[in-house]
Image (cartoon, rainbow, N blue to C red):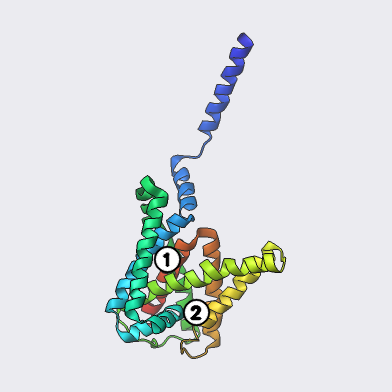
Amino acid sequence: MVARAGHAGGERDATAGRQTRASPPRFQWIRSYLRSSRRPEGAALAALPLLLIYGYGLLIASPAARSGVDGVSSALLGLFGVRVYITVLGALAATMLLAVGLRLRGRLGGHALLAAPMALESTLYGLFLGTVILDVMAWQGLMGPLLVDASFVEHVVMSAGAGLCEETVFRLLLLPGTALLLTRGLAMPRPLAWALAIAATSLAFAGAHHLGGEPWDRFAFIYRALAGVVFAALYLARGFGVAAWTHAVYDLYVLSGQT
């Protein structure tokens, strides 16, 4: 009996020791935030404000500003028209909110609290990347008037559209799709397949900007391709929500810095 009691006491001491060595609550919150913000529901809630800003902004933006949004949106606007396109965006926003609400049920409020730290994290990334790009552009003598004369509000709309649509096409869809094609179709090792997928989608991202009429510029193509690599890395490391918001903040900062 004494031996058993001693053994039980040792187990309690070991358990207490493990609890003492556990991470402080603030580190547990950081781990929970990093994990939750990468999940699909966290990414959807983060992307929803971009979708609403972009959809409403198209209603008040000038035709010139509408034509100056990202190449993906410009093509869809030209294909469907503003009214149909905005209706589709509204239906998509409602569907996203309903799907997330059904998935999370009573936990929707907790995940909604992720919006503020995700916005802060993305803003830091976007400002850093934008500062680097603006400094390099100034060094190369490429600072000049924008192709589209737009107000600050219209810059916000254009940036939200670019962050949402371009990240959806190039990172959310094409990046994993290309990697899957290379691994399953060509039996390529996963590290090599993902590296090639990042390179290919980043080059496609850079090239897509010149399909809408923007004059070819080698430097612009190179820095956009490198930015595509950064966005791909953010998408893989931090998820779609952080990548989309970083892209939007980066675009807004660069657009504002060129005015």
Amino acid type at image mark 2: Val
Q: Label 2 belongs to which residue?
A: 136
State left or right for residue 9 relative to residue 107. right
Q: Residue at x 45, y 81 (%)?
A: 71
Viewer-closest of 127 and 235: 235
Q: In the displayed structure, would residue 108 be above or below residue 9? A: below
Q: Residue furthest left?
A: 60
Whole-percent x, y for residue 138 in the image: 46, 83
Q: Position of residue 66 (x, y in %)?
A: 35, 82
Q: Residues under labels 1 and 2: Cα distance?
A: 22 Å
- Image quadrant occupied by the N terminus: top right
Residue 53 makes an appearance in the image: yes
Instruction: Give coordinates of residue 7: x percent, y percent.
Output: 61, 17
Dot 1, crowdedness within 10 Å: few (<14), some or many (≥20)?
many
**At x 38% / y 71%, what residue is drawn?**
160
The three-letter code of the residue at mark 1 reads Trp
Tell which of 230 and 102 is nearer to you. 102
Which of the two labelled residues, at mark 1 and mark 2, occupies the earlier sequence position? 2
Q: Quadrant of residue 175?
A: bottom right
Q: Please tell me which residue is depicted at 42% across the width and 51% down the height of the picture.
A: 103
Q: Crowding near pointer 2: few (<14 within 10 Å), some, many (20+)?
A: some
Residue 200 to residue 4: above or below: below
Task: Residue 233: name its quadrant.
Answer: bottom right
Q: Is residue 61 left or right of residue 123?
A: left
Which residue is the site of mark 1? 245
Judged from the image, the secondary structure of the residue bearing numbered disc 2 is helix
Q: Left or right: where does residue 226 sit relative to residue 91?
A: right
Q: What is the quadrant of residue 192 in the picture?
A: bottom right
* Secondary structure type for disc 1: helix
Q: Nearer the viewer, residue 249 or 56?
A: 56
In the rendered image, residue 203, in percent from the top left (x then y), is placed at: 58, 78
* Mark closer to the observer (1, 2): 1
